[in-house]
Image (cartoon, rainbow, N blue to C red):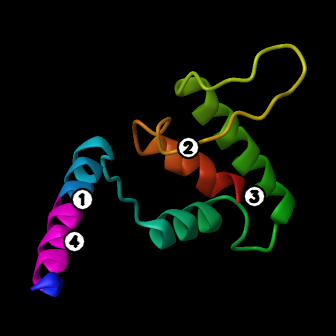
Amino acid sequence: MGKESEVSAMEIDDKKSTAPDQINNPKFSINVLQLLKSSQMQHGLRFGDYTRYRRYCTARLRRLYKSLKFTHGRGKYNKRAITATTITEVRFLHLVLYTA
C-alpha cells in the first residue's frame, strides 16, 4: 500500500515539472555542421587561410551583437552572459557558435 501511494505521488510531481519547462523555454534549432562548413569554405578555410576566416568570424560577431542590441557599451568591457532567459531568437545561438 505504501509503495502505491509513493508511485502516484512521483507521477504527479513529474507531470508538474515538465509542463512549465515546455511552455517557458522555447526551443530553437540550427543545423550546426551545415552552417559551419559553408562559412568555413566560403571565407578562407578552403585554402587554409585562417587569418581571413578569423576576420570573418569577428566581423560576423560584431554584426550579430549590433543587430541583437547586445552591445557592451563604450566603457570598460564587461562580458554579458548568454543564458536561457536572454535567448529570444536563433541568432543568440549563432553568437555562441561563432565565438567558439
Which residue is identified by label 4? Answer: 10
- Between 70 and 42, which is closer to the camera in this rendering? 70
Disc 2 or 4, which lies upstream in sequence? Answer: 4
Residue 47 percent coordinates (x, y): 76, 73
Q: Nearer the viewer, mark 1 or mark 2?
A: 1
Nearer mark to the viewer, of 1 and 4: 4
Percent x, y of residue 99: 70, 52
Q: Is residue 76 above or below residue 78?
A: above
Q: Amino acid at mark 1?
A: Thr
- The residue sitting at the top extreme is 74
Say which amino acid is labelled 3. Tyr
Q: Earlier in the sequence, mark 1 or mark 2?
A: 1
* Structural distance between the alpha carbons of marks 2 and 3: 27 Å
Between marks 3 and 4 in the image, the one whose residue lies nearer the viewer: 4
Circle 1 or circle 3, nearest the eye: 1
Q: Main secondary structure of the magenta part?
A: helix
Q: Position of residue 18 (x, y in %)?
A: 24, 59
Marking on residue 18: 1
Residue ID for mark 3: 53
Q: CA distance from mark 2 to mark 4?
A: 30 Å
Question: Mark 3 or mark 4: which comes first in sequence?
Answer: 4
The residue segment tinted magenta is 4-15
The kind of residue on which mark 2 rests is Thr
Q: Earlier in the sequence, mark 1 or mark 4?
A: 4
Residue located beneath label 2 in the image: 83
Residue at 70% of width from left, 60% of height from top? 100
Residue kind at label 4, given as amino acid type = Met
